[in-house]
Amino acid sequence: MAALPKNEIITIDGPSGSGKSTLSRLIASRLGYTYLDTGAMYRAVGFKARKMGIDLDDVQGLEGVLANLDLQLAPGQGDTRVLLDQEDISDAIRTAEMGLVASQVSAQPVVRRKLTQMQQAMGAKGMVVAEGRDTGTVVFPEARHKFYLDATPAERARRRCEQLREKGQQADEEEILQQIIERDDNDSSRTVAPLKAAEDACIIDSSKMTVDQVLVFILEKVENL
Ligand code: DC
């Protein structure tokens, strides 16, 4: 495989449960890139707002949450470890409830502005796989490799249930499907940086593909461009 230029950025956007995290992590590991989990950042801001007792649509309150935001991401083998004010909140932010909280704060322009700036600084040196909803459209519009991963809501709910059950947790597929539909609606209908594929993104419907098939497809595209 030919070495990719050092400043390369790969963006992977799509709705929740489309397999973005698994694939972004695998691609980053195969290429020796850093995995940038932008969703974890929205979750951390939502978590902090909740902890401070701030309403999720209180703009002034959110400005307070964002001031002196001490947020660190440590990508590892599994989920990115997330430190807020030096406290490890990785597990606390990865619940269905915090997904909805993150989705709500992410609709606030003040939150998006701040996190977009942080993400751009994190990607400034390249060699990054950025995963989220707007990484190809807003955060890294100049990225050469953009992918938009999708799957039917029913298939995404099925995968989420399987993941939860593998972790020994109970999962109600119908309830998860409703949460997925609600989050898709929130994320695609907001006015600032809504969930959508960049015009120059390669759209992949992974409903009937295995993780390995998508991985091979993306790596071939990246290596041959
Ligand atoms: O990818 P995730 O499930 O961890 O993301 C949680 C929420 O954060 C998602 O519902 C919408 C928001 N988000 C966003 O608005 N923009 C991003 N780039 C990433 C996440």
Image: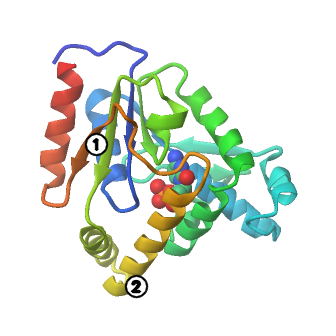
Where is residue 215 drawn, in percent x and y?
A: 19, 42
Residue name at image x 70 percent, y 48 percent:
109
Task: Estimate how packed mark 2 is, as few (under 14), some (14 to 19) or many (20 or more) residues with alpha carbons within 10 Å.
Answer: few
Residue at 73% across / 66% down in the picture? 56
Q: Helix, strand or loop at disc 2? A: helix
Q: Pinpoint residue 102: horizontal percent, then vertical percent.
A: 60, 61
Residues under labels 1 and 2: Cα distance?
29 Å
> Residue 26 got which mark?
1
Which amino acid type corresponds to the residue marked 2 in the rendered image?
Glu
Instruction: Name the residue rendered at 61%, 27% in the picture.
Output: 121
Residue 146 point in image, percent of width and height: 34, 33
Report the front residue among 77 and 50.
50
Of residues 152 and 46, the one nearer the viewer is 152
Instruction: Report the residue marked by disc 2.
Output: 175
Task: Identify whether 153 is placed above or below 147.
Answer: below
Work out whether 94 lies above or below 122: below
Q: Give the x, y percent position of residue 75.
A: 46, 43
Q: Which sits earlier in the primary sequence, circle 1 or circle 2?
A: 1
Question: Camera-side residue: 80 or 133?
Answer: 133
